[in-house]
């Protein structure tokens, strides 16, 4: 059915509108006279038309007026069809500068093609500054190795072109270096003491520092960071089961002439940074950049990467396949953290299967370490989930029995798989935490149901109250309950009512809300 222009214009406002064959003639007519904003909307709609739109654009392009040619080339770029490559290469020589620039941009959206490389190179040689910018961006995305030589020198006379060329070279170097080995050697020893920063969840720094003290004088320097002098192998750090990541701190010069990009580049060119990267990297170091304060800040990332490329050319910026993450901390004293990424972490290799809302391994390790290891322990996790708390308790030291229960069959299946991978025997049962009555329990260690939805649900407090009363009846004299409470004041009150001694611990970041790591003891 043929639609009138008003009907079609209203269809264009629908983000899901896909044109049929009957729409095409009217759409191309509208495209010719549309405003810039409306033209972009029509181009997006046409790009959903697939084969029939591709055929129609290729037929119309040779005879179309200049203003329409530029818009039709945009459609080809949006379609991303390699069958349009030859036509787009011809358009690079179009007498209208807009058409040529948009053709270069469109070629940058297709797969690498040597013929397109040659056509873009020719356009670079003969083009003005505007065309060179589009060509450089396209070569940065899809160019072959020859494009690096073509873009070897960024013209200083045009700062914007110079910036685009530098960014294109960065992308080319990144892409063409992939495939070379770049991995972390966790057994290599640093051999000289450097400041190591270990990040954990907020609230767990004292536990993490205690795990690390056999390696040096570890101390909490913030709510979530532990620092220690370190000269060993990365594998030594795996003793810290509450750690999330670790990296070497390299201080930044506070008044570097070129600002933050120059300060980061100088830090990476320092003897300490070179020693760290050379010691722990197999192959060429590849890195990504992250700001501790958050945010992408793409323009600043490119300026920093450009400065690094000049100061330390052996480092390759590659956020998709990095062996190192460079974390920029701007808050005084400003510093850089070199965080290794490309290695296998053996600490939680038993974690084969997970369930929704299961504990993070660092949380499970913190609960187990707070509970401690007694050879006589009969340990019960009444909300066992995927089993991490019991596995971490088993790895901590001797015990007599491990018991786990849950109402969810999927959770019990996941726990069985993880216990099998850890090679640990366990008694798993289906049942309600407030009704099961295992005998002789001396330790309950668990991460109970919680979360923002449950915190808004008034049933959570009643569940925790009921469980505390049940646990107080079950625990042997001297037994303890170690858990994370999202309602610490309420559960302390319930513990007092159940005649349990309450030993409050730190408030721990659970990802959007806090919970208190509590120990409740039966006299």
Image (cartoon, rainbow, N blue to C red):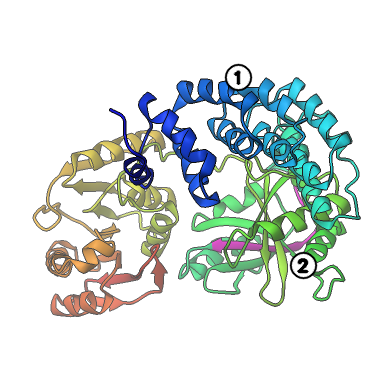
Give how far apart the Cα atoms at labels 1 and 2 are: 45 Å
Q: From the top left corner, tell me how far across and down residue 75 is, in percent.
A: 55, 34
Residue 174 appears in view: no
Q: Which residues are magenta?
A: 189-199
323 and 369: which one is in front? 323
Q: Residue at x 16, y 47 (%)?
A: 407
Between 230 and 411, the residue placed more toward the observer is 411
Residue 495 visible (yes or no): yes
**Is 180 in front, or is 7?**
7
Q: In the figure, 365 relative to 410: above or below?
A: below
Residue name at image x 77 percent, y 61 percent = 193
Residue beneath the point at 51% across and 70% down: 206
Residue 260: which numbered mark, if any?
2
Residue 175, position as x, y percentages in the image? 72, 35
In the rendering, at what x and y percent does residue 31 appear? 51, 39
Give the quarter of the image for residue 440.
Answer: bottom left
Q: Is residue 197 magenta?
A: yes
**Which picture quadrant has residue 228?**
bottom right
**Residue at which label 1 appears:** 83
Label 1, secondary structure: give it.
helix
Looking at this view, name the residue that lies furthest to the left. Answer: 435
In the displayed structure, does residue 445 sit left or right of residue 305? left
Residue placed most toward the observer, 514 or 59: 59
């Amino acid at each position: 059915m043929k639609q009138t222009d008003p009907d079609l214009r209203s269809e264009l406002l629908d983000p899901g509108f896909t044109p049929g064959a009957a729409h095409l003639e009217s759409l191309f007519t509208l495209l010719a006279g549309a405003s810039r904003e409306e033209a972009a909307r029509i181009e997006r709609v046409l790009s959903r038309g697939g084969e029939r739109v591709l055929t129609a654009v290729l037929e119309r392009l040779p005879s179309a007026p200049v203003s329409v040619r530029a818009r039709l080339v945009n459609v080809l770029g949006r379609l991303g069809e390699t069958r349009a490559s030859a036509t787009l290469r011809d358009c690079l020589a179009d007498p209208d500068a807009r058409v040529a620039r948009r053709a270069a941009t469109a070629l940058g959206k297709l797969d690498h093609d040597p013929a397109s490389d040659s056509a873009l190179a020719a356009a670079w040689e003969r083009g003005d500054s505007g065309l060179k910018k589009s060509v450089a961006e396209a070569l940065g995305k899809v160019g072959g190795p020859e494009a690096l030589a073509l873009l070897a020198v960024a013209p200083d006379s045009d700062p914007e072109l110079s910036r685009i060329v530098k960014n294109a070279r960065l992308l080319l170097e990144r892409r063409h270096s992939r495939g070379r080995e770049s991995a972390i050697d966790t057994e290599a020893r640093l051999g000289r003491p450097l400041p190591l920063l270990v990040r954990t969840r907020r609230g767990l720094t004292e536990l993490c520092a205690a795990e690390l003290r056999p390696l040096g004088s570890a101390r909490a320097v913030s709510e979530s960071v532990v620092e220690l002098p370190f000269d060993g192998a990365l594998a030594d750090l795996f003793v810290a089961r509450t750690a999330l990541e670790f990296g070497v701190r390299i201080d930044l010069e506070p008044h570097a002439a070129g600002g933050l990009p120059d300060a980061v580049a100088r830090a990476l060119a320092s003897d300490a940074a070179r020693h760290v990267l050379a010691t722990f990297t197999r192959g060429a170091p590849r890195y990504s950049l992250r700001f501790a304060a958050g945010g992408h800040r793409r323009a600043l990332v490119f300026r920093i990467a450009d400065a690094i490329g000049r100061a330390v050319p052996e480092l390759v910026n590659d956020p998709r396949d990095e062996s190192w993450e460079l974390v920029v901390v701007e808050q005084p004293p400003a510093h850089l953290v070199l965080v290794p990424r490309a290695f296998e972490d053996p600490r939680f290799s038993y974690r084969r299967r997970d369930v929704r809302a299961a504990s993070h391994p660092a949380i499970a390790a913190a609960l187990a370490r707070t509970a401690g290891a007694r050879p006589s322990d009969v340990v019960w996790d009444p909300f066992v989930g995927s089993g991490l708390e019991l596995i971490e308790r088993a790895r901590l030291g001797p015990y007599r029995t491990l018991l786990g229960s849950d109402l969810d069959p999927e959770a019990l299946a996941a726990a069985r798989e993880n216990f099998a991978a850890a090679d640990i025997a366990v008694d798993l049962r289906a049942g309600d935490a407030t009704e099961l009555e295992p005998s002789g329990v001396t330790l309950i260690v668990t991460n109970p149901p919680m979360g923002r939805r449950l915190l808004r649900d008034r049933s959570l407090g009643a569940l925790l109250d009921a469980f505390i009363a049940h646990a107080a009846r079950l625990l042997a004299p001297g037994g303890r309950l170690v858990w994370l409470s999202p309602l610490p004041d309420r559960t302390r009150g319930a513990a007092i009512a159940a005649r349990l001694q309450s030993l409050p611990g730190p408030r721990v970041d659970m990802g959007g809300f806090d919970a208190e790591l509590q120990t409740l003891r039966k006299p």
